[in-house]
Image (tube, rainbow, N blue to C red):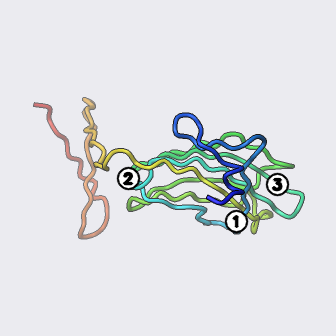
């Protein structure tokens, strides 16, 4: 490490990196334009199980927002929680998460059309996946209602065929 970094960083307790007194992190990087359908980030759920993001959004010089987003994902599902959100005037973006083919997508959209083109920067702390991926268990319907069953899909016509199959418990 060069001398300047040695003055800022040290080895902390429990294998942490310690910053010298009154040191902080800053970030800017390349910004992302926020439009309907913008993907802010994506990652494979086999590589990472969760991410905590710090997101800053600006529309011009007077509309600003900062928030933290916590995301956890598995091959068939992702859940996100926004916390610590602060906005000047009003919120600028909506956020959603989706999983497709093992990739977790963090999607951002302007809160209203007037905020189209807002500029977004983020940084994330990624937690690597600990366990090897396995498909989630399939949960069978255990209902005892007479009308319960499974509608079948006709692959020839690509429609639901309205046939109801039921399974007896044995």
Q: Is residue 107 above or below residue 138?
A: below
The residue beneath circle 2 is: 75
Contact (Cβ within 8 Å) of mark 3 with mark 2: no
User: Which quarter of the rendering shows the C terminus?
Assistant: top left
Q: Which residue is mark 3?
A: 64
Residue 28 place in picture, x, y as percent: 73, 62
Residues 114 and 119: in front is 119
Q: Tell me what residue is drawn at x 37 percent, y 45 percent.
A: 130
- How many angstroms separate mark 1 from mark 2 (CA)? 30 Å
Residue 75 coordinates in the image, percent (x, y): 38, 52
Q: Position of residue 125 (x, y in %)?
A: 57, 50
Q: Nearer the viewer, residue 12 or 118?
A: 12
The residue at the point 30 percent across, 59 percent down is 160
Q: Residues within 10 Å of mark 1 (few under 14, many from 20)?
A: few
Alpha carbon separation for disc pair 3 and 1: 17 Å
Q: Earlier in the sequence, mark 3 or mark 2?
A: 3
Name which of mark 1 and mark 2 comes first in the sequence: 1
Question: Number of callouts in the render?
Answer: 3
In the picture shown, does residue 125 fall above or below 44?
A: above
Q: Which mark is residue 18?
A: none
Q: Counting other residues with Cα less than 10 Å from the Cα at mark 2, is it few (<14), some (14-19), or many (20 or more)?
A: some
Left or right placement of residue 122 versus residue 76 in this view: right
């Amino acid at each position: 490490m060069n001398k300047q970094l040695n003055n800022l960083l040290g080895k902390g307790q429990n294998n942490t990196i310690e910053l010298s007194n009154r040191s902080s992190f800053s970030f800017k990087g390349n910004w992302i334009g926020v439009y309907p359908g913008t993907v802010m980030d994506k990652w494979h759920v086999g590589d990472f199980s969760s991410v905590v993001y710090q997101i800053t959004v600006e529309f011009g010089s007077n509309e600003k927002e900062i928030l933290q987003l916590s995301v956890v994902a598995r091959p068939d599902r992702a859940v996100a929680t926004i916390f610590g959100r602060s906005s000047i005037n009003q919120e600028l973006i909506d956020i959603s998460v989706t999983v497709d083919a093992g990739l977790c997508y963090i999607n951002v959209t302007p809160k209203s059309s007037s905020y189209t083109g807002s500029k977004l920067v983020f940084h994330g702390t990624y937690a690597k996946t600990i366990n090897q991926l396995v498909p989630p268990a399939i949960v069978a319907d255990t209902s005892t209602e007479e009308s319960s069953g499974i509608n079948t899909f006709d692959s020839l016509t690509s429609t639901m065929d309205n046939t109801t199959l039921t399974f007896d418990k044995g």
